[in-house]
Image (cartoon, helix red, strand yellow):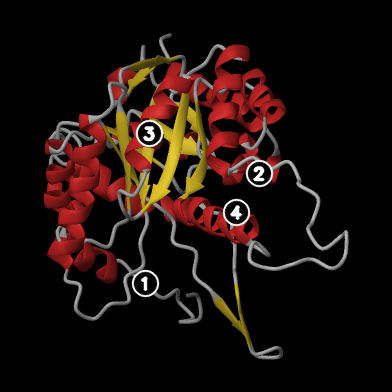
Amino acid sequence: MNLSTTYLGLTLRHPLVPSPSPLSHNLDRIRQLEDAGAPAIVMFSLFEEEVENTSLQLSHYMDYGSDSVADASNYFREPVDFVPPMERYLKLVSDAKECIDIPIIASLNCTSLGHWVEFASLLEEAGADAIELNIYDILTDLYFDGLSVEKRNVEIVETLKQNLSIPLAVKLHPFFTSLPNVAMQLTNAGADALVLFNRFYQPDINIDTFQIEPDLRLSHSHELLLPLRWTAILSGRVSADFAITTGIHNHVDLIKSMMVGANIGMVASELLKNGLSRLGEIVSELQHWMEEHEYESVEQMQGSMSYGNVDDPSHFVRANYIRTLQSFRFDTTGQDF
């Protein structure tokens, strides 16, 4: 039985890949992921704000007191070892490539070009096999229109691809007015794969402290439905590989992802909740299911339930909305919701 798949030009032993998370924050954890059976690793994301804020802080402390006359010998702080986030990230990628045998996909989270072109090139030099670009932006400007957002994203991808020789994946959110058109523009600009979807973490309000607080919740299988639908609609129609992330917790979720056309499924929440052993367990369950249903390879099932291959593609579009509403039934007592 052949469980292998290809993604970003890489041949992987099986299609279940750890996605960006604290599980890849250091070399020991990366080794543990490989030992647990990961066929590749998508590194935790380096954020644009993290790099920019560190640069501003460093500049502040380098200049602090430069125009003053110190009366005390301890006026100036002793120098401390400082390694910028970019350098730490590059070193981790380089060290990982030296000690593990599976592909490393670096992850950048940004909204503008800035110095990302240079840094992406440095990641390639450090040994990254590919880069996942997460263009994550919350717009609050009333006058910044949707077309401008799309144009900026396409320009980022286009510029990065012109300066890279390794593959580039783009992680999307589902809130574009015309997701198929954006997907086509990004692949035309050079994106080798599309990752569906980015999770937006929403802030909450504490009514006792009157503070806005972060609210981090791990994913659940029901969140898989949205990326399933859009991967089914896009796969085979857009010339890119597909990765589904958010909502994969078991072999059933992974099988569904393959059937709609994904090359890989990405997992993080399940590993964080239940341990790295879940990687091997899910793959074993996938293999057992394939044996029961007489599948000889993962490739055989990939895209079999996509928009272009099902008998009635209307299930993926507006007609499904009507069917879903009409499918609701009360029980005989009228109490069961």
The mark that comes first in sequence, 3 or 4, is 4
Q: Measuring from the top left, give residue 93's x and y in whole percent.
A: 54, 26
Counting residues from the start of the chain, the first of labels 2 and 4 encountered is: 4
Tell me if label 3 and label 4 are in contact, CB under 8 Å: no
For image coordinates 18% across by 47% down, the residue present is 155
Helix, strand or loop at mark 1? loop
For disc 1, the neighbor class at 10 Å (few under 14, some 14 to 19, many from 20) is few
Q: Residue at x 59, y 68 (%)?
A: 215
Q: From the viewer's perspective, tell me whether residue 174 is left or right of residue 92.
A: left
Q: Where is residue 6 in the image (x, y as percent from the top left)?
A: 33, 19
Is any atom of residue 306 visible in this view? Answer: no
Residue indicated by mark 4: 58
**Separation of residues labelled 2 and 4 (CA atoms):** 33 Å
Is 144 situated above or below 156?
below
Q: In this view, does 265 lie above or below 196?
A: above
Pointer 3 with pointer 2, Cβ within 8 A: no
Q: Specify the label residue 120 is tagged with.
A: 3
Q: Give the label, 2 or 4, closer to the camera.
A: 4
Residue at far right of view:
73
Where residue 332 sits: x, y (%)? 45, 76
Residue carrying label 2: 272
State the separation of the CA atoms marked 3 and 4: 22 Å
Q: Circles 1 and 2: CB distance less than 8 Å?
A: no
Q: State which tag comes first along the sequence, 3 or 2.
A: 3
- Neighbor class of circle 3 (other Cα within 10 Å; few <14, some 14-19, many 20+) is many
Q: Where residue 177 sits: x, y (%)? A: 17, 64
Q: Residue at x 63, y 54 (%)?
A: 62
The residue identified by callout 1 is 329
> Which type of secondary structure does the marked residue at label 2 adopt?
helix
Q: Mark 1: which amino acid?
A: Arg
Determine the CA span between mark 4 and mark 1. Answer: 62 Å
